[in-house]
Amino acid sequence: MAIIGEIIKKAIELSNNITDTPDPLSAQPKVLLELLNKAKDTSFGKALKFAEILSNKDPHRSFASQVPYYDYDRIYSEWWKDVYKGEGNITWHGKPDFFALSSGTTSTTKYIPVTDDMLISMRNAGIRQLLSIAEFDLPSSFFETEILMLGSSTDLKEVNGHLEGEISGIGAYNIPFWLRRFYKPGTKISSINDWDERIRQIAIKAPEWDIGGLSGMPSWIELMLKKVIEHNGLKNIHEIWPNLEVYTSGGVNFEPYRKSFEKILGRPIIILDTYLASEGYIATQLRKDTDAMTLLTNNGIYFEFVPLTHENLNDDGTIAEKAEALTIAEIEEGVDYILLISTVSGAWRYMIGDTVRFTDKEKVEIKLTGRTKYFLNVVGSQLSEYQMIKAIEELEEKNNINIQEFTVSAVRKGEDYIHRWYFGCKDCLNIDKTDIAKQLDKILQNKNKNYKVARTKALKDLEVNIIPDKTFYDWAEAKNKKGGQTKVPKVMKEEEFNGWEDFVNSQP
């Protein structure tokens, strides 16, 4: 019997039972007041009259009317550029010791402040998730195993008196001392900048480790596991890590990766979704009865929600000035919302770029449904990433195939447009792409009335190209975006798509 593991398991179960989960409807107004109070004497707080907002009978309404919407470009150019230069008390008190570099889906690197308060917030969220494991009745032996966290390099760069790197690297750099004995691949390997070399070292050291949990982006975790299997001559990953029980996914919708991921396992494991962005730890799965995530409403982040509609978005993807933002008390289930956050890192009414959908309003449980940049609406089709993924899932089911990655763009043909898709897969390279295109077109028309109308007007056709999934990862590597928090874009603008097609056509 795993005696130490049994003790740890019992302690976690007890802690989970006594952990107080505050009512989000009362917690969120308190979070807003705390944020405003801490930042009222900053340059931002003075300019936007936080003291006046705090004295108002309805601080939320005053906050919403006095503080504009910000996307990254606006808040950086107006405020964060001074923070990045080393100035203090700009959008949050003091100066941040870290900046998260977002490798995202665009070519421009984003520099996002990570304050001490945000690090505490992220640590608290991690502990809350750890406590939730008590829900899943894992064997005692699991609590004596190690956790392999595959993120960006912990070899952070010093600039202007701060350290910068991707958020997963910053998180690993600041890993609590009590967790270090369980943490793999360890500081030496995690500091290797070259992703392929880091994975090679993990594959070499894998037989020495007893991995019970995995954490990281699904596409890169899968490639890492395949490398471990290949290097060690295995049939599946459980041959080398028999106690592997939990995988914590994050950053993207896991469903497109589920089928191929399960093929490299020896048996089913628990898959938990988390929502850790460069701007903060936003949500995590806390219950075994759902794959939805609970918003962390009492942890230094204030949430607002703008319905995802064509009217609420400008042509450049920013939120329209007249769009109304809702509080957590005003949302509805089953509606896609553009997520806004105000945080202990000095982000204010900040458009993080993601869309969410509430599956349970009372429990504030959400699913990540896509990116605002993946809202394809060039000719009024109004396709969200969530709708695209659901259509592809139906396509997979009908044809018994697995589409690992995809991207799409609206391509001009004469005076009209077509939607040109690229599917990345292994088992469907020889399938009839014309037939697949017809099926996809029919599914989308059935699922989205705006798309159906667009197909009778300026959207004249839909094309599908089928390529090896490896091409997507090779493209990411060519863009210097391999590993870490990198997301392969689901929707591309015309210029980026032209570059993508040039890359695809250059492959042997």
Image: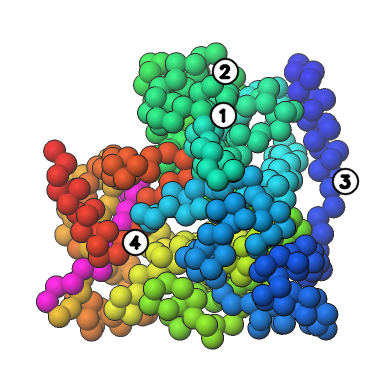
Identified at 67% across, 75% down, the residue is 47
Identified at 47% across, 54% down, the residue is 110
- Magenta residues span 396-414
For the residue labelled by badge 2, is the local secondary structure a helix, a strand or a loop?
loop
Direction bottom: furthest residue: 322
Q: Earlier in the sequence, mark 2 or mark 1?
A: 1
Residue picked out by circle 3: 18
Give whichever of 485, 119 is nearer the camera.
Answer: 119
Residue picked out by circle 1: 148
Q: Earlier in the sequence, mark 2 or mark 4?
A: 2
In x, y percent, where is residue 237? 47, 25
- Mark identifier at residue 403: none
* 458 magenta-colored: no
Q: Mark 2 and mark 4: span between their CA atoms?
A: 39 Å
13 relative to 18, above or below: above
Q: Mark 3 and mark 2: span between their CA atoms?
A: 33 Å
Q: Amino acid at mark 4?
A: Val
Give whichever of 375, 72 is nearer the camera.
Answer: 72
Q: Mark 1 and mark 4: span between their CA atoms?
A: 31 Å
In x, y percent, where is residue 123? 71, 43
In x, y percent, where is residue 174? 65, 36
Q: Is residue 199 left or right of residue 86?
A: left
Q: Nearer the viewer, mark 3 or mark 2?
A: 2
Instruction: Specify few, some or many for label 2: CA neighbours under 10 Å numbering under 14, 14-19, or 20 or more.
Output: some
* 400 magenta-colored: yes
Query: Quick one: quadrant of the N terminus?
Result: top right
Q: Earlier in the sequence, mark 3 or mark 2?
A: 3
Residue picked out by circle 4: 491
132 relative to 22, above or below: above
Residue picked out by circle 2: 209
For the residue labelled by badge 3, is the local secondary structure a helix, a strand or a loop?
helix
Q: Earlier in the sequence, mark 3 or mark 1?
A: 3
